[in-house]
């Protein structure tokens, strides 16, 4: 072999010495569970394990489950993290490198949480305390993982930077944002400084600096708080400079108020630019009373914070958000100013005034005077007005005219309506009152309804209060804006709608103009039995709550046993269709040797189908203590082990009755025996003392008494032995059945 080939072998061996020279010996880990005593011996025999492995544990806990495993992994991750932090801090001090401890710890924890593989697991079982999980990670493997992590991180960051450069060259500026941000996030997530971090930062600053934002219009004046914004502004975003710019098509943005706010969900609005780099911003209802507000936009990063194959730290996420906020809050914003009055123009078209000619000048004069003194309206003559006022006068009725006022946007969209009967002699006062009603109607609307019957009700929620229907017909006054309508049948929701309300509506329009009613329907319930895996012997029971006064009882609807010949269940195969969705149902799964599993299904009048319910049964564990319990309490075993057999359930109560009967009878017989025994010895002592007495009648009396109690004593003891023998027979039979069940169900 040539000198260069030998040199290559030496380099490879040196590079992989952490594997070839690993001190870890995985053969010391047993595959089976261990007792606490065995674990102590195992640790004494392997004292070097603390030098070769990181250790984490969780427990004790009654059940060995996923949560216990997760807790053990968390403990192990913290142990490794603390060690790496200590090593890096020592190294950084030597190199006079500035240490940001919180950033370092967060990045390490993010890495460790996704890199715990090839751990060695020991499960220690204690009969009294439960299970403890011990996890071990070879220290040499951790060092190896760190090296691989750094290589993979460098590879990915450079790949994303290359993807970014490729998109920029192709002028796909919108699509260049995602790989650039991913490169930035991964570089910021490294716990050892890397050169690519500054490169990603430089590219990001350059990219963000080339984004141009324009609003049309740039300012929206005279908006009223609590009223839907009258203008829907447009935003256009491009890349480059003013002389050479390219529309950022399909770019996703977030719009947000920098001060103040509106009715946007979570105070944010998502936008996607069209092929021309433009979109519209529906400002909704301005809820804040801040006079001068600003709306800014920034790129949507919600899809960038999760990398399926690589960890991104919280520090990196916060750094990107801070970077974007710092740039876009300083860019061009949309200015929104609020007014304390409606700035209106008045349409004085004679078409609306259906009244005598002599009255029209008085109406115009009264309107002008009412507007000039109004606290809610201001009449403008220029083009800056964004609201229009229409006044309609109907034919005279009796001594007054019906006057209606309508407020609308300049595009014709209605905002409010009001009407009032006004006398010609009191036109000024009447119109002032009408304008106040018009202002109120701009913020509220009337909701009209008619119900079919009393058990159907309506619940309406706006931004201030909750209102419920009291009669079969009527109306609600709600605040304009987002309103939630709930239609209920006997207190259960069967329809729920959220609507934006800016005018009067009739709810019966949603029900084909018929009285609002509910008709029970069918609902499908999906389920799957994931445990036990062997389904043979499983019995399903399908029950329904009884209606009326007996609603605390269950009606048995169907039962079915799993059949291998028919491929499982037939009539109760998933999904089970409930014939009436206004009732509560219960699905019970039974199998001999397993604990019953029940799924109670509450009425849900809105859903036609319910998602899959995963049913996991738990096996009856027959440890020594449990077997002793079943042997000492006749009937318990038959009831707990044979869930699917009715005659076994009856048998269990028969054993209870027999045991109680024999025990009580034996106890009573023994009590009678003790009483008779005491009386017998008392009379026996008396008649024996009368042997030499001169009164033979007295001797015969006490002798007869003693003989009677002796007979009672003998009979009581015989009954006691029979009843005690009965208890013994019940226990022997029960023990035989328990042992037979153990061998049958747990072979």
Image (tube, rainbow, N blue to C red):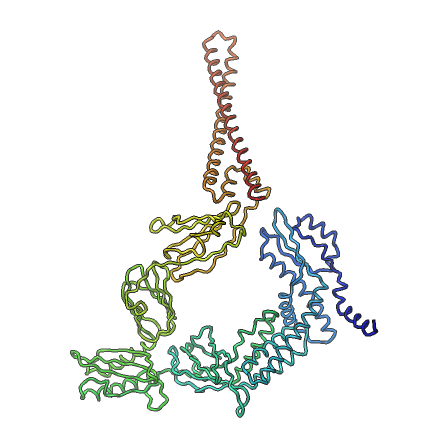
> Picture coordinates of residue 28 (x, y %)?
72, 54
> Picture coordinates of residue 58 (x, y %)?
62, 56
> Picture coordinates of residue 352 (x, y %)?
24, 85
> Picture coordinates of residue 535 (x, y %)?
51, 50
Nearest the viewer among 213 and 380 is: 213
| Quadrant assignment for the C terminus | top right
Nearest the viewer among 377 and 165 is: 165
Q: Residue at x 45, y 77 (%)?
A: 261
Quick one: which residue is furthest to the top in this view?
694
Q: Is residue 246 left or right of residue 446?
A: right
Q: Is residue 606 left or right of residue 159?
A: left
Labels in figure, total: 0
Q: Residue at x 51, y 45 (%)?
A: 592
Question: Which quadrant of the figure has residue 354?
Answer: bottom left
| Quadrant assignment for the N terminus | bottom right
Quick one: which residue is furthest to the left in this view?
398
Q: 339 above or below 27?
A: below
Quick one: which residue is furthest to the bottom in this view?
243
Quick one: which residue is furthest to the front in this view?
565
Question: Which quadrant of the figure has residue 460?
Answer: bottom left
Q: 79 above or below 588?
A: below
Nearest the viewer among 707 and 454 is: 454
């Amino acid at each position: 072999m040539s000198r260069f080939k030998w040199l290559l072998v030496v380099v490879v061996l040196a590079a992989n010495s952490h594997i070839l020279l690993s001190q870890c010996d995985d053969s010391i880990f047993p595959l089976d569970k261990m007792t606490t005593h065995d674990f102590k011996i195992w640790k004494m025999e392997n004292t070097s394990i603390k030098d070769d492995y990181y250790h984490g544990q969780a427990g004790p806990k009654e059940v060995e489950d996923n949560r216990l495993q997760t807790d053990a992994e968390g403990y192990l991750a913290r142990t490794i993290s603390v060690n790496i932090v200590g090593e890096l801090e020592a190294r950084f001090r030597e190199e006079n490198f500035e240490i940001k401890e919180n950033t370092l710890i967060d990045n390490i924890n993010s890495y460790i949480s996704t890199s715990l593989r090839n751990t060695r697991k020991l499960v220690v079982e204690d009969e009294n305390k439960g299970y403890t999980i011990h996890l071990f990670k070879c220290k040499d493997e951790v060092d190896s993982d760190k090296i691989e992590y750094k290589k993979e991180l460098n590879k990915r960051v450079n790949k994303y930077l290359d993807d970014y450069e490729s998109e920029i060259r192709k002028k796909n500026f919108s699509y260049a944002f995602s790989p650039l941000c991913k490169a930035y996030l991964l570089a910021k997530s490294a716990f050892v400084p890397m050169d690519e971090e500054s490169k990603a930062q430089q590219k990001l600053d350059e990219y963000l600096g080339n984004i141009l934002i324009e609003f049309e219009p740039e300012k929206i004046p005279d908006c009223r708080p609590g009223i839907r914004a009258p203008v829907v502004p447009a935003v256009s975003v491009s890349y480059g400079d003013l002389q050479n710019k390219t529309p950022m098509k399909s770019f996703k943005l977030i719009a947000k108020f920098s001060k103040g706010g509106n009715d946007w969900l979570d105070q944010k609005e998502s936008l996607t630019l069209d092929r021309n780099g433009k979109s519209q911003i529906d400002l909704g209802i301005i809820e804040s009373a801040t006079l001068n507000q600003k709306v800014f936009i920034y790129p949507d990063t919600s899809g960038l914070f999760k990398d399926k194959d690589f960890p991104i730290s919280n520090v990196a996420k916060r750094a990107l958000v801070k970077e974007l906020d710092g740039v876009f809050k300083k860019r061009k914003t949309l200015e929104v100013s609020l007014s304390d009055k409606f700035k209106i123009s008045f349409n004085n078209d004679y078409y609306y005034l259906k009244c005598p000619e002599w009255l029209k000048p008085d109406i115009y004069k009264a309107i002008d005077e009412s507007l000039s003194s109004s606290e809610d309206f201001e009449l403008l003559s220029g083009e800056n007005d964004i609201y229009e006022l229409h006044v309609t006068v109907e034919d005279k009725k009796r001594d007054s005219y019906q006057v209606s006022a309508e407020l609308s946007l300049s595009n014709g969209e209605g905002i409010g309506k009001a009407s009032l009967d006004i006398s010609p002699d009191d036109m000024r006062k009447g119109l002032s009152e009408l304008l106040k009603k018009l202002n109120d109607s701009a913020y509220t609307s009337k909701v009209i309804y008619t119900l079919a019957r009393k058990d159907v009700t309506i619940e309406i929620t706006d931004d201030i209060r909750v209102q419920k229907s009291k009669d079969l017909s009527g109306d609600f006054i709600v605040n304009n804006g987002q309103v939630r309508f709930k239609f209920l049948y006997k207190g259960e929701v069967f329809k729920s709608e959220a609507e934006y309300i800016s005018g009067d509506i009739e709810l019966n329009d949603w029900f084909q103009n018929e009285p609002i009613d509910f008709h029970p329907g069918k609902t499908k319930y999906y389920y799957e039995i994931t445990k036990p895996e062997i389904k043979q012997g499983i019995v399903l029971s399908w029950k329904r709550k009884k209606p009326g006064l007996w609603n605390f009882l269950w009606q048995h609807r169907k039962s079915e046993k799993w059949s291998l010949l028919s491929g499982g269940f037939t009539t109760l195969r998933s999904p089970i269709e409930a014939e009436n969705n206004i009732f509560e149902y219960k699905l019970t799964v039974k199998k001999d040797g397993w604990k019953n599993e029940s799924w109670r299904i509450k009425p849900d009048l809105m859903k036609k189908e319910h998602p899959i319910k995963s049913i996991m049964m738990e096996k009856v564990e027959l440890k020594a203590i449990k077997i002793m319990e079943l042997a000492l309490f006749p009937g318990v075993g038959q009831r707990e082990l044979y869930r699917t057999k009715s005659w076994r359930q009856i048998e269990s109560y028969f054993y209870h009755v027999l045991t109680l009967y024999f025990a009580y009878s034996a106890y009573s017989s023994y009590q009678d025996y003790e009483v008779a025994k005491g009386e017998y010895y008392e009379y026996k002592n008396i008649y024996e003392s009368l042997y030499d007495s001169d009164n033979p009648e007295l001797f015969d009396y006490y002798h007869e008494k003693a003989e009677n109690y002796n007979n009672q004593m003998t009979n009581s003891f015989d009954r006691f032995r029979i009843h005690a023998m009965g208890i013994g027979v019940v226990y022997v039979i029960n023990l035989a059945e328990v042992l037979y069940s153990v061998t049958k169900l747990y072979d």
